[in-house]
Amino acid sequence: MRSEFKPSLLALSCALALSACSQPQPQATAGSSGTDRAAAIWPQLTLPVVQDVAMEQRISAMLANMTLQQKVAQMIQPEIRDITVEDMRKYGFGSFLNGGGAFPNDNKHATPADWIALADAMYQASIDDSLDGSTIPTMWGTDAVHGHNNVIGATLFPHNIGLGAANNPALIEQIARVTAREVMVTGIDWVFAPTVAVVRDDRWGRTYEGYSEDPAIVHDYAAAIVTGLQGAADKDFLGDERVISTVKHFVGDGGTVGGDDQGDNIASEADLFRIHAQGYVGGLQAGAQSVMASFNSWQGSKIHGDKYLLTDVLKNRMGFDGFIVGDWNGHGQIPGCSNDNCPQAALAGLDIYMVPTQAWRPLYENLISQVEAGVIPLSRIDDAVRRILRVKLRAGLFDKPSPANRPLSGKTELIGSAEHRAVAREAVQQSLVLLKNNDNLLPLKPTQRILVTGEGADNIGMQSGGWTISWQGTGNTNSDFPGGSSIYAGIKQAVDAAGGKVELSGDGSYQQKPDVAVVVFGEQPYAEGNGDLDNLEYQRGNKTDLALLRKLQADGIKVVSLFISGRPLWVNPELNASDAFVAVWLPGSEGGGVADVIMAKADGSVNKDFHGKLSFSWPATPQQHANVADADYQPLLPYSFGLTYGQASTLSNSLNEQVAADNSLDALVLFERAVKPPYQLVLHSGDSSQTMDSSVAQLGNIAVRTFDNKVQEDARRLSFSGAAKVSLTSAFPADLRSYHEAGSALVVELQYSGNVPDSVLLGMNCAKNCAASINIASQLRALPDGQWHSLSVDLSCLAKQGADFSQIFTPLSVQTDGPLQLSFSDIRLVPAQAANASLRCQAE
Ligand code: BGC
Ligand code: BGC
């Protein structure tokens, strides 16, 4: 029964750091070689939430009454798409999560009431002792990484890179506080934030989740965010408007070789601490109760299995007494482990296995057997469960009413409230960095005639980036952001109020010649993995935005570029083609904050000045990875650069546009884990077509779904039941002549199963209805059924069929009369491969 777990008042007050009740933090086992080694580099931290004797006794009493099954269940964290409420009742999991783009009832438009209903059902099932006998409340963890970003209508803050530019810890604490409140409205207890990666190579697709390349900002921000989420350790700690926070991903995720996601960080131990661990120092000293282990390795060893870092360093040396949660099946990447079998992680010090997919079932069974067989000592399980229960007690989960009955639950008026949005809007204003401002073009007088154009102009999805409603942030339209504003909407409001004229144009054309053009362009949304780059050149091989800027300048129009991006990119040509240039990062739902700064008051005076300073160095070449304090530091614009109004613009108008000579044409990646921007996957059947914007899509004779080949969601399966077509298409044509000239082949990793119809046309589409295709049916049939293969087509074959490579809208389409099952996982144009292609034409 629950009542036996009621904490004493003494226990609660002791949790608030009354030294009289405290007992020493766990110390290193004397003489343990790991902890001795750690002592040379890692500090012993003074943590603000101290252990409390009565609480620890209470935990011991609970442990004494728990079965092994119940204990292991505390260590298993399944995902809402792979468990039911009945599973929760049966097993009593210690926690569960929703991954990015996972919603109650699989409904993207789930309401706050739906979120609360699921939270309450899971909670009730966990404390219901009818099946597993456990009465320990479960807890729900979610990625509220820039606001409560899985929930429609929530306030979305700028991604961390923009907050880093704002460099304002007090504002950051307020943002975290607002986030905690919106999360609490939906009955959720725990947030997987902040990310405290110190990003040293901006090719990493998670660069925008980092605040800075400099550990100092990350250290201070970690403390501010943790305090905002959890409350201060001595005041309102984990109170009714607060959530448990997670500093992630421990450790070194921002410093992998090549900026590879989930890659290897080879820093020395001293640098691992000095550069990459500063967010943990700040976060733990503010009382963070959980730490997420990272996917990456350190010097070749996967962190999920690294006992030295997890146990000796983090727990024993730094004194962390909360729990370590794993990342998404991250344990399965330890050599010798799989997602469903991995005693190594528990032995290394992992306390909670994040185990989405159905792997949780065998993992749970295996862990139990491994304890029974003595592979994992019971003492390690008891330690993990003690940590989990300690955090639950500190968070008051045993005393709080059920999620539906907590003070903020259901107060839907708080989600996206005006007060919360005002905080986000202020953050947007403070995050913008002015890189160039010839002749004080900015601020713009709102009484002028202004053209607003570019793909990002009226596009809240694009300005919000990844981790926005969906995992990768793709597939959103403005209607998915009720209450939010696009950058254009903010400009329009200012111009309308002042009596000027504003025209929105998709392609840069205009009814009447404007006085000035504001072009909003930049990166399409992406998240983990999909955002990794080979180099930092913007729109490599496909400079459609540059063409737009140049066209406007050629028309004699001054150009203001607003660059949406998750990282600094090499944009020398675009800078040259702009009279003013602002890095707006990923501002989130309050696009209006941009106009607050770039638009003057009606009388021409400054409304709000620029405040943001680069927290990342801006690269001088596509290959440069400059970080402040590097020995040979020669970025285009240094760390902490940012103009304010009235300051002279220093950037030349003729920056070097030549990419370095060693930078020969790289492969153009069209699909790698996801469709690469600007392309989208489009289904065509009969006269209709439809863009694929989630993990499944169906139109007439064609169904497409996401599935796993080597890593999560890296492949697409096309099921044709009759005549239909699937294409990778962009709204703007790309000039791919350099690929044709470089003797490239279109290379597709694919697999088919079952019959191959007589006609399977692989094609390309270009402007003015030009199209070219080739029947690959016989090549397919020559490959063994069910196995992955690489099929390559010499681009000259398509040229012979009429492809005009100067204007390609669709670099790949597959059309058949069906039925056909065809999957692909990788598509690229690879220079100098034509001669080796499966289908060759050059010699003919
Ligand atoms: C899931 C996301 C999840 C991500 C984590 C994806 O396969 O769809 O929900 O957040 O993996 O890596
Ligand atoms: C990410 C984490 C995230 C988790 C749950 C992982 O793939 O690396 O940052 O918290 O998924 O969605």
Image (tube, rainbow, N blue to C red):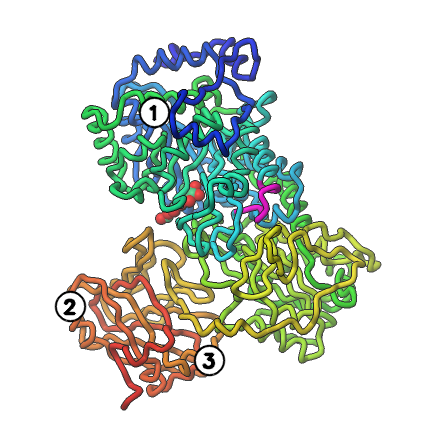
Q: Is residue 532 above or below residue 64?
A: below
What's the amino acid at mark 2?
Asn
Residue at 47%, 9% in the rendered image: 8
Total numbered labels: 3
Q: Nearer the viewer, residue 493 or 717?
A: 717
Instruction: Say whether mark 1 is within 8 Å of ligand 2.
Output: no
Kindly indicate the quadrant of the structure image that contains residue 382: top left
Q: Secondary structure at mark 1?
A: helix
Q: Is residue 778 magenta?
A: no
- The local crowd at label 3, few if under 14, some if 14 to 19, many if 20 or more residues have their Cα within 10 Å, is some
> Label 2 to label 3, Cα distance in Å?
34 Å
Q: Which residue is mark 3?
A: 807
Q: Is residue 150 in sight in this rendering? A: yes
Q: Which residue is mark 1?
A: 126
Residue 352, given in percent of the width and then of the height, sits at 36, 31
Residue type for callout 3: Gln
Is tag 2's residue or tag 3's residue first in the polypeptide sequence?
2
Taking depth in this image into account, of 46 and 390 the one nearest to the observer is 46
Q: CA distance from mark 1 to mark 3?
A: 58 Å
What's drawn in magenta, residue-wise? 210-218
Dot 2 lies on which element? Answer: loop
Is residue 119 in sight in this rendering? no
Q: Residues within 10 Å of mark 1 (few under 14, many from 20)?
A: many
Left or right: residue 788 compared with residue 797 = left
Quadrant location of residue 66?
A: top left
Report which residue position mark 2 lands on: 755
